[in-house]
Amino acid sequence: MKFIHAADLHLDTPFQGLTDLPTALQTQIMRAPIDSLNRLVDLAIDEAVDFVLLVGDLFDQAQQSVQAQAALMLALERLNDAEIPVILSFGNHDFQPDDADWHFPANVHAFGSQVETVTLTTAQQTKVAITGFSYAQRWLTTPMIDQFPMKTSSADYQIGMWHGQTGVAGDHYAPFKVSELLGKHYDYWALGHIHQRQELNAVPPIDYPGNLQGRQRNETGAKGCLLVSSTADHQLRPVFKPLATILWQDWTPTLSGEVSRSALLAQLTDQLNAAMTTPTQLVSITLPETCTLTTAANLALTQGTLLRQLQQATTGETWWPVDLQLAQTTSAPATLSFGEDGATWQAVGQQVISSAKVAEIADRLLDEDFLNRALLETLTPDQWQQQVRQLLTDHYQLTTQKDGSTNAD
C-alpha cells in the first residue's frame, strides 16, 4: 500500500515581506502554491498511490478566490481521471459549515465537523479505515479525541487525520496529546496545521508533513509532502518528497577581514550564484562576525543601498535577496561606570553637547560633499536642506508639546 499525506496547501496565499520584484519572479511567486499542488498530483500519478490525504487549510481563508477553487478542482479531476481517491478536511484557515455547497469529483470525500470514518479497498484488496473531521469555525476548542473510535479489526490499517496541535482543552486549534493518539492504536496519524515538518512519534508514525509551499521568511527549507508506504512487517513508513517551486533560505557567506563596499557586492554575487540553484530561492543573508565592513560598506548596508544593488545584480531566476544584515555580536557590551551620582556624565555632557558643538554638527550636515560621501546619494544641496529642516521641525514639534507630553502610536 502507498499513499500521500499532505497538508496546508494555502492556495491563493499572500507571500509576505517581498517588494520590488522583477515581473517574471513576481508571476512565479503568485503561481507557486498552485505549481506545488500540480507537482503533488504528478507525484501521486507517477507513484500510482492508492489514495491521497489532504489534512486541512487547503485554502488560505474561508472565502476563496475563483482561481484558487479552480486550481484545486482541476487537481482533483486529474486524480479522479487516474482513479486515485482523495480524502480531505478543512482546517482553521478554510473552515466550512457542514452545508457548504462543494461539487467535488466522485473520487473525493470531504470530512464534516463531526468525526467520521471512511473505508477504502485498494487494488491489492487492502482495507484501510480513515477517520477525521473538518473545522466548521475558525477555532476548535472542544476535545475531539473521544469521538475517534479505537482501531477496528475489520480493517488492515487504521489512519487518523487531525488538523491541530498539541495542547490542552480550551486551546484554539483542536488540541491533543500524543499519548491520546497512541491510545487509539492507529497505524498512522496524518497531521496538519504546523508548517514545519515534524515527527511526533516514530512507531506508529505521528507526523506533520509541513506546508506545501513556504509563504514567508520564517518558513525556510524544502517543503512538500510525505509519501507513505507499507512494509513487510505491517508498518507504515513516511518519506519526505520536496514539491515547492520557491524556497526561503537563511544563508551566511564566507567572508573575513575588512571588506569594502564593491568587494562585498562582488563576493556576495559570486557566492550566491554558486550556492543557489533551482528551485528559486528567496535568501535572507547574514554577514558573519569574521568580516569587518569599511565605513562606506557599513553605510550602504545600513541604508539598504547594498541590498538594492545586490537585487539589481541578479535576474531572480535562481535567487533573490530579501534581507541583508550583520550577525549579532555575541560578546557582552562594555560597561562604563562614572559613579552612582552621575556627576561625571553631567560634566561630560555639558562639554560635548554644547550649543557650539550642535551648530558645528548642523553646519556639516548641510555640506553637500559630506552628504554625498556618507549617504551615497545624489540629492542637491537644496533638497538636502529641505529634508533636514523638515526633520528638525518635526522633531521640535514632537518634543515640545504645550502640555509637556510627547506623541505615541
Image (cartoon, rainbow, N blue to C red):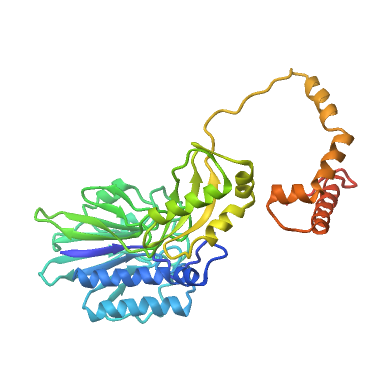
Q: What residue is shown at x 53% (from left), y 56% (from top)? A: 310
User: Does residue 229 show up?
Assistant: yes
Q: What residue is shown at x 42% (from left), y 56% (from top)? A: 273
Q: What residue is shown at x 47% (from left), y 42% (from top)? A: 255
* Residue 114, position as x, y percentages in the image: 35, 66
Q: Observer-nearest residue: 161 or 198?
A: 198
- Total numbered labels placed on residues in the image: 0
* Residue 145, position as x, y percentages in the image: 32, 55
Q: Is residue 49 left or right of residue 98?
A: left
Q: Observer-nearest residue: 6 or 272?
A: 272
Q: Is residue 167 left or right of residue 226?
A: right
Is 109 drawn above or below residue 159 in the view shown?
below
Q: Observer-nearest residue: 208 or 380?
A: 380
Within the image, what quadrant is residue 274 found in?
A: bottom left
Within the image, what quadrant is residue 334 found in?
A: top right
Q: Is residue 332 left or right of residue 355?
A: left
Q: What residue is shown at x 24% (from left), y 73% (from top)? A: 85
* Residue 385, position as x, y percentages in the image: 83, 54
